[in-house]
Image: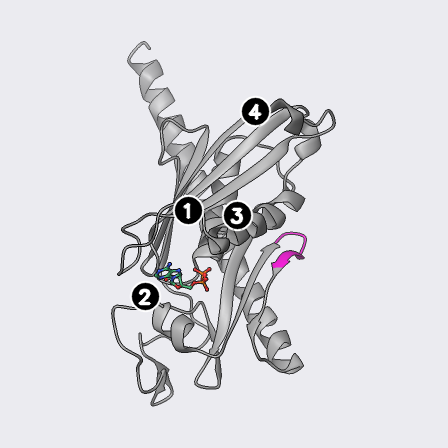
Amino acid sequence: MGSKFGAPEKLIVNGKRLDGRKFDELRPIAIKAGVVPNADGSASIEQGQTKITVAVYGPREVFPRHLSDPNKAYLECKYDMAAFSTPERSRPGASRRSTEISKIMRDALTPAIFLEKYPKTKIDVYAEVTNANAGTRCAAITAAAVALADAGIEMRDIVSSVASGKADGKLVLDMFELEDNYGEADVPMAMMPRTGEITLLQMDGELTKDEVVEMVRMNIEACKNIYELQKKALHEKYLIEKKGAEEGEENGG
Ligand code: ADP
């Protein structure tokens, strides 16, 4: 679907993936917190050529009011692909796929948030894919968790997310687009690395039980690494803010 290249003859050549990565190697990941000044919290993620910005608004007044819950906040997630995010123009607006991904984002994030601390409010999470190159649902969840923390929303833990798949019979971590489009299977997952709780597990394609176990193991290891990058992004934002405040004080502000 939508690849710039035709179908490759093979996805694994001389024991290596087409982008040179090892089977259990993540794409390069860059996460930044606080990238949308108008939002209450935000984050961006670049994972290989997948690029996503997430903005969080809230906790704020619920509209329409009948969605207001006296016991907890109402969490809404919206996943969207920009028209320019795929090689062929992607049709703007909701699709079956974007509706599904919005729902699984909500399911993956909900267990981490102390929603009961914010009764009668709404928390909106908007994920905008600006460049799609596989793994967008997982990257959106990873960035959303950072954006929620950046918004100061209390959480049990950060949620980290990654997918692994099967390409040319080999189990591979964090597929890029060619592997995703022409590979045999896909297992996206999200978890809270501190508690080990898995908050999302999907499977597309045919896999044996042993393969699923191995992919989950690979995903857990990768989530631990992603978790460190998420914490680093939040720490860096905090350091920048602290430095700014100190400079302001020095200047008599
Ligand atoms: P994910 O992005 O979570 O892997 P999918 O497996 O549904 O979700 O999609 C895999 C990849 O296929 C996307 O990341 C994107 O690169 C590509 N893709 C998805 N939808 C479209 C589309 N409408 N047009 C072009 N490419 C698409």
User: Are circles 3 and 2 on residues that touch, CB within 8 Å?
Assistant: no
Read off the magenta span: 193-200
Give the structural element (helix, strand or loop) at label 2.
loop
Label 3 or label 2, whichever comes before in sequence order: 2
* Residue at the extreme right of the image, as rendered: 71
Q: Which residue is mark 2?
A: 2
Front-most of 116 and 96? 96
Dot 3, how many residues are within 10 Å of its Cα: few (below 14), some (14-19), or many (20+)? many
Q: Which residue is mark 1?
A: 80
Q: Picture coordinates of residue 162 (x, y %)?
A: 50, 61
Seen at 42% across and 69% down, the residue is 175
- Cβ(mark 2) to ligand 1 < 8 Å? yes
User: Are circles 4 and 2 on residues that touch, CB within 8 Å?
Assistant: no
Query: Picture quarter containing residue 221?
Result: bottom right
Label 3 or label 4, whichever comes before in sequence order: 4
Seen at 63% across and 82% down, the residue is 208
Q: Specify the amino acid type for callout 3.
A: Ser
Give the structural element (helix, strand or loop) at label 3.
helix
User: Are circles 1 and 3 on residues that touch, CB within 8 Å?
Assistant: no
The N terminus - image quarter: bottom left
Real-space Cα separation, disc 3 to disc 4, in angstroms: 18 Å
- Cβ(mark 3) to ligand 1 < 8 Å? no
- Judge left or right: residue 177 versus residue 189: left
